[in-house]
Image: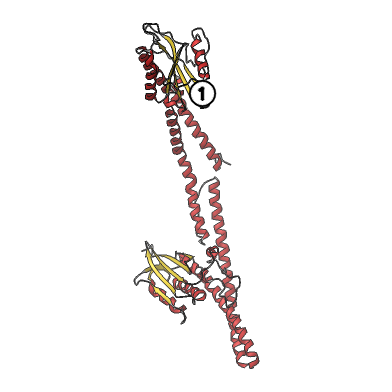
Amino acid sequence: MKPFSTLSAKILFWLFLNLSLVAGIFLIFFTVRFQKDFQGLLGKHAMDRMRTAARLVSHELDHSPRQEWESILERHSKIHGVDLAVVTQKDRIGPSDDFSFPPEVVAETEKALAFDYRRAGRQFHRGRFERERRMEPEMGPDGHEPEGERPPRLMIRTKKPTVYWTGTFMPIRTKPFAPPEKAILLAASDSLSGNGFFFDPLPWIAAAGFVALFSVLFWTPLIRHITKPLERMTRASEKIASGRFDVTVEEKRADEIGRLGRAINHMTCRLAGHVKGQKRFLGDVAHELGSPIARIQFGLGVLEQRCDEQNRQRVKDVLEDVAHMSGLVNELLSFSRAEISPEKVGLETLELLPIVREAKDRESPPDVEIRVQVPPGLTVCADGKLLTRAVANLLRNAVRYAGKDGPISVKAWSEKHETVVQVSDSGPGVDEEVLDRLFEPFYRPEPSRNRKSGGAGLGLAIVKTCVDACQGSVSARNTQPTGFEVSIRLPRKSEVN
């Protein structure tokens, strides 16, 4: 077997290629973008916001008295969308009187403020202050960190309720003209992103959107490579299910779809051979039975004239049975003759009204009303004899099963490039579950089959065969509240014209 000749191998290879391309693109992007600052991958924008807020708050607190610090923190908290607080070695100031510092936060901030980072040779992990490349920076002459240095950050989560905390060092003067002291600016929020102070989700959302869009565009050719032939096979299977066996599926592929197409073609050939053999057998049997039945009828007719009154009724009963057998044989002959391939049928554009009138005259008993509503001049592309036989069979069927329930209607109209012929009655209809089987040969909704209940179940099968030969379609449905309806759809004009 050739590599990637199976559909599963193609899908796995495409998936691996998709993941490899996405990983390669991200690797190149991260290498170029963060080769000097990989910490930015995890939230450079969030750290910048925290450092900027620390500078602004530190500057404003340095130039304001101690009693105004709480209002300053409250104002900055509203601006940034998080609760801002300041922790020094001697005091803790929140944005309001009811702001509380959980014990975990107090312990971590006290430990951080008391720790000497200049002599520490290690880095604290999550839940403690995190360093990027160096220890705590030296304070400049103005009390602020030198340009380019980055303060450590604090990340804590407290429970009941769940609150996320982050912090960064900043210098602060607790007294006028006093040297700056080391303090911590804390930001607290019940949201994991903390309005951008803890984590900035936008880059990740953009990355996820890029991956999704890239994957959709990348997978679309393979999906179309799979679904397009499946759609063609579905349409072919629907035609085969409707009784058309002149359908072939052209799929020159080595995978499962190609094998499925070849299996459908093989199945179609086998079904066409079986159906043609069955119809040929039925036609041959019906033809061979025709002559013996005719001789039996002739002999019984002579016998009826010569026998006495006592046996004459028995001869009549036998004649009725033979007549019923003769009708069955005639239906078999009609069914076998109606199976003509569309290539052998001479389709032409005909006026529909004379065809319907001929069928009505042939199948209209005196005690049944048949209403014809066909506009004059309405044309149809069909074989005149086959279409007349189809409409006549529909009328005969309606008269047999619903002739006493009300008038029978024959309507016709044009729809786009088609002509629709509809035969409906007011009878009881049939069960919904058997509608799809009505056009099968020898199928009858009634469990019994005798001379009083109807024919051999070939009437609608002959209709379908005639309509198929005219390149049309036929369907049946029940109407509400009562009634049964059969619709024939045929092209209005020949494609040659």
In this rendering, the answer to whether 316 lies above or below 468 is below
Q: Is residue 417 left or right of residue 234?
A: left
Query: Quarter-wise, where is residue 434 in the image?
Result: bottom right
Nearer to the camera, 360 or 326? 360
Residue 461 percent coordinates (x, y): 52, 68
Please tell me which residue is depicted at 58% across the width and 67% down the height of the picture.
Answer: 278
In this rendering, the answer to whether 395 lies above or below 18 is below
Q: Is residue 481 visible?
A: yes
Nearer to the camera, 192 or 486? 192
Please tell me which residue is depicted at 48% across the width and 44% down the height of the picture.
Answer: 225
Q: Is residue 347 visible?
A: no
Check the picture and name the quadrant holding the C terminus.
Answer: bottom left
Nearer to the camera, 153 or 291? 153
Query: Quarter-wise, where is residue 495 in the image?
Result: bottom left
Q: Which residue is mark 1?
A: 157
Check the picture and name the quadrant holding the N terminus.
Answer: top right
Query: Quarter-wise, where is residue 349 in the image?
Result: bottom left
Residue 80 percent coordinates (x, y): 39, 24
Residue 170 percent coordinates (x, y): 42, 13
Mark 1 residue crowding within 10 angstroms, few (<14) / some (14–19) / many (20+): some
Q: Amino acid at mark 1?
A: Arg
Colour mapping used in the image: secondary structure
Nearer to the camera, 290 or 322? 322
Q: Residue furthest right?
A: 310
